[in-house]
Amino acid sequence: MADSAAGVGVTGPSTAVVFGAASGIGRASAQALMGSGLHDALVSVDLGDVPDAALHLTADVSNPGERDRVIDQLLAWPSRIGALVYSIGIAEPARATRAEWPRWQRIIEIDFMAAAHVLCALHDRVLQDATAVVVVDSTAADTGSSVAPPYGAAKAACRILTRSLATLTGSTGARYNSVAPGPTETPLGTGLARSLGTDQQLFAQRTIAKRLGQPEEVAAAVAFLCGPGASFINGTVVVADGGYLAG
């Protein structure tokens, strides 16, 4: 199957790799990518099962050893990786106190360090395969977060990492971009709201749309960035937030 998603003239079987494909935006992104007709196989990475994947790698990305195992398996994958989506993260309240530092470390490890480890280790393969990489960050990277500051900081770091890696792609055809969701109906958003003693409608009211986004709406932006129509888009962020930042 021809796949020009990442570079002109790239042909042959293509695999979509999705970290966090078991639920939420990651799950919707996996479905959108496979529905595009551009990819022959899905490789998923998640703690939860993904039954429609050609290869599912069960992994806890907070563990560097498990990340190394996944990286080794992806480097050995026999066909071209046409798209790579990183959509793993946690969000939970954290105060800015000395006692809370272990919580900060855990959030930063999962939300930034794991992404940095994976993307750095796979960078040469991304260049070789002319892969379209999309990292799902958050509008918290733009606004910060008073209730979950390490989450906002980690997502901002992910965005700059993504942009920095884009500057290293040259004329290879590889691309790195970010998608920044606003309040979206996902297990992550529901869990954060519940931990604050409220529900996500509180966040939805801050959008122009006055509603939550659906994972499929964010996944549409992910799939676009991995597709041929985005071949000249590199090193930027697409915001899918219902007007959260503008409102």
Image (cartoon, rainbow, N blue to C red):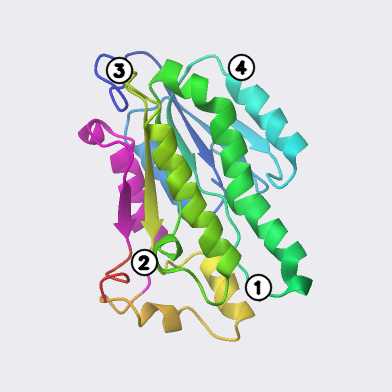
Residue 76: mark in rendering: 4
Q: Nearer the viewer, mark 1 or mark 3?
A: 1
Q: Which residue is mark 1?
A: 94
Q: Is residue 41 shown above or below 160?
A: above
Which mark is first along the chain, 1 or 4?
4
* Magenta-highlighted residues: 212-240
Q: Secondary structure at mark 1?
A: loop
Q: Which residue is mark 3?
A: 2
Q: Secondary structure at mark 4?
A: loop
Whole-angstrom CA distance, mark 2 to mark 3, is 32 Å
106 sits left or right of 220 in the view:
right
**Disc 3 residue type (three-letter):** Ala
Pointers 4 and 3 in contact (C-beta within 8 Å): no
Whole-angstrom CA distance, mark 1 to mark 3, is 47 Å
Q: Secondary structure at mark 2?
A: loop
Which mark is first along the chain, 3 or 4?
3
**Disc 2 residue type (three-letter):** Gly
